[in-house]
Amino acid sequence: MKSLKQSNQAYLYGIGAICLWSTVATAFKLALAHFSPLQLVFVATITSIFALGIILLFQGKIHLIRAQFKAKPLFYLQTGLLNPFLYYLVLFKAYDLLPAQQALSLNYTWAILMPLLSVPLLSQKLTKSDMTAAIVAYFGVFVIATQGNLTNFSFESGTGVILALTSTVLWSLYWIVNTKNKGDPVVSLLLSFLVGFPFILVTLLWTQELPSWNSQAFAAGIYVGLFEMGVTFALWLVALKKAQRTASISTLVFMSPVMSIGFIAWILQEQIASSTYIGLALILTALALQQLLPHLNKLKRKDSRKSA
């Protein structure tokens, strides 16, 4: 009975996180109507630092911040440069240049790219399922980037497409680096933001200026900081912790891009192109193949052993 209650709680936390994550692509575009990408990173990072600090205060883990940093300062320098500094700067610039539907869909290929990067960086083996998923996903990327014009290689914003795909490299590298981290994940995220913030501030003061007050813009920026970077991450960790099977919660991620497209069409009034639907369907199919093919292969091996 207790395990059933925990499982239900896991789904509630997981669905809550997915619903919040599904709204942030829309919030990106609303904020970027007033802020530069770097200014949005600045506002969102400050918000996230405060949010994560409050979460750790309630969890009684504030004392871990100093201990974890002292143990691995260079590690947190790496993660802070990757996330939030480089990743969100590149991602927000991609959203600034592309329709939200395109930037969102292209960014979701990070889960396909990460196993490919793990081969040279973590000495992992490349599986047939990884290769199959990559081929399907990047064909979907091509469909979205060319808006379905597969023969003339015409891109609405080639720079935007390159930046969106670069963001997947940076996000994958962030999680690959984190595979070596044994510390508390919320503390680690806060430390990354604390270390990355000075780079954001110096770059902003050097190249631009601090954002001027605009209530709508700051509301959108704070929303991004809370529900893209901060609170939602903590909700997702709780969901994974309470879940009886991690895979059952992880599959909820497939809901997010579909819901995001709905918010983009409803709130931003973007006309969703048929090429976006096709490309996103291919990317989601690739993610499903990446998850399902290894399990199917295991079942086949078990059946062959039994028959032998």
Image (tube, rainbow, N blue to C red):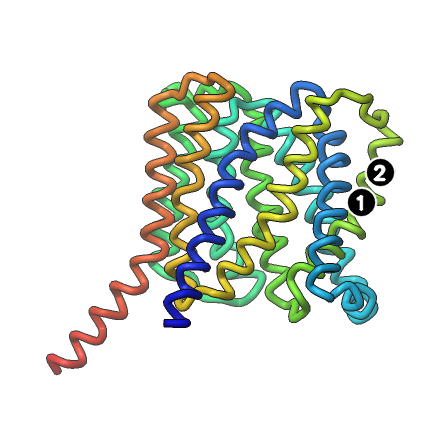
**Residue toward you, 109 or 132:** 109
260 relative to 83 in the view: left or right: left
Does 198 appear above or below 188? above
Secondary structure beneath label 1: helix
Q: Do the residues bearing badges 2 and 1 touch, measured as CB atoms within 8 Å?
A: yes
Tell me what residue is drawn at x 39 percent, y 45 percent.
Answer: 254
Does 15 appear above or below 155? below
Q: Residue 184: where, in percent of width, then height?
A: 67, 66
For badge 2, the amino acid type reads Leu
Label 2 crowding class (10 Å Cα cut-off): few <14, some 14-19, many 20+?
some
Q: Residue 110: where, in percent of width, then height?
A: 51, 46
Identify the residue under disc 2. 201
**Quadrant of the frame with the C terminus:** bottom left
Q: Residue 39: where, in percent of width, then height?
A: 76, 29
**Mark drawn on residue 258:** none
Identify the residue under disc 1. 197
